[in-house]
Image (cartoon, rainbow, N blue to C red):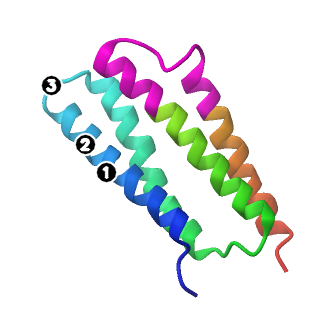
Amino acid sequence: MAPNRPELVFAGLAGAVGVAAAAASAHGADERMWSAVALVALSHAAAFIGLSLAGRERQWMRYATLAIAIGVALFVGDLTLRALIGERLFPMAAPTGGVVMIAGWLGVAVAALFQR
């Protein structure tokens, strides 16, 4: 089975952000914030590679993967802006991103349960 391109794009972007955040954390920037960004981005980069192999024939899997990507972007984007310029993406962006990621992962579970 060939991997799906959108998930690999998400993986590449998340991986690049994760490595950059880990480097920022290691070089004295806001270590706690950058470590959180690195953890979420790098773990989801690997997850997107796995999701790219899971198949997208099920509508639920497509929606779930998109929800995870949106959640990662909101969470990581908000923490990155706070670390760089001290401003939020918008109020409650990081918690909203976390909830959207959780919903996406639950969607993956539902898609797996009902996969034929």
Residue corresponding to mark 3: 28
Report the quarter where the C terminus lies.
bottom right
Residue 53: numbered disc: none
Residue 20: numbered disc: 2
**Rendered location of residue 75, percent (x, y):** 51, 32
Q: Secondary structure at mark 2?
A: helix
**Rendered location of residue 97, percent (x, y):** 60, 33
Q: Earlier in the sequence, mark 3 or mark 2?
A: 2
Residue 16: numbered disc: 1
At horizontal 26% and vertical 21% (from top left) the residue drawn is 30
**Rendered location of residue 19, percent (x, y):** 27, 47
Image marks 1 and 2: residues in contact by CB distance under 8 Å: yes
At horizontal 54% and vertical 33% (from top left) the residue drawn is 74
Q: Which residues are magenta?
A: 77-97
Q: Nearer the viewer, mark 3 or mark 2?
A: 2
Amino acid type, label 1 = Ala
Image marks 3 and 2: residues in contact by CB distance under 8 Å: no
